[in-house]
Amino acid sequence: MSEKELRRSLSVFPIGTVMKLTDLTARQIRYYEEQDLIHPERSEGNRRLYSLNDIDVLLEIKDYLAEGLNMAGIKHVYKKQKEEEKKAKSKQPLTDKDVRRIFYDEILSQGGLSQKSQNPFGMKGPQL
DNA sequence: CTTCTGACA
DNA sequence: TGTCAGTA
């Protein structure tokens, strides 16, 4: 692991800072943690400490939500993303955008995973 | 003052 | 998801 990755993984921000950086409510941020989408560490006083990586994920989740995906859809994306990561280690490296495009198509073609009252019409498509 | 967990008129 | 309570 490079030093840069290590630093991005250091948990140092309290939830208040993450709220301002992501525009998400504390309720949402904690909920996504329950869904195992992020894994913040805890301080001595049991306070959550987030890393830059956690913030990036939160920002991505916000995008997926805006694109009309519900929790099931988002979890599906990350699940598939991990599967691809393993394959990529032995084969050709897949970029983050490739992963997004591939699963965006896959998910939408299946029709499901989109949020009920949202996107009554069509989705705009991934911003690549 | 900020964050945490649990709960729901 | 919002929000209120009672803490730490």
Image (spheres, coloured by chain):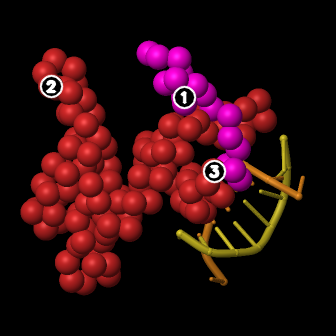
Chain colours: A red, B orange, C yellow
Contact between marks 2 and 1 (CB within 8 A): the answer is no
Q: Position of residue A68 (x, y in %)?
A: 31, 69
Q: Give the residue pinned by disc 2.
A: A92
3 or 2: tag closer to the N-terminus: 3
- For badge 1, the amino acid type reads Ser
2 or 1: tag closer to the N-terminus: 1
- For badge 3, the amino acid type reads Val
Residue at x 15%, y 25% (from the top left corner): A92
Closest to the observer, B4 or A77: A77
Q: Which residues are magenta?
A: A1-17
Residue at x 21%, y 33% (from the top left corner): A94
Residue at x 72%, y 40% (from the top left corner): A47
Closest to the observer, A124 or A16: A124
- Identify the mark at residue A119; answer none if there is no mark: none
- Helix, strand or loop status at disc 2: loop
In the drawing, does residue A22 fall left or right of residue A96? Answer: right
Is residue A120 placed above or below A102 in the rendered structure? below
Residue A43 visible? The answer is yes
Q: Position of residue A57 (x, y in %)?
A: 45, 45
Q: CA distance from mark 3 to mark 1?
A: 14 Å
Q: Give the residue pinned by disc 3.
A: A18
- Helix, strand or loop status at disc 3: helix
Residue A61 on the magenta span: no
Q: Give the residue pinned by disc 1.
A: A9
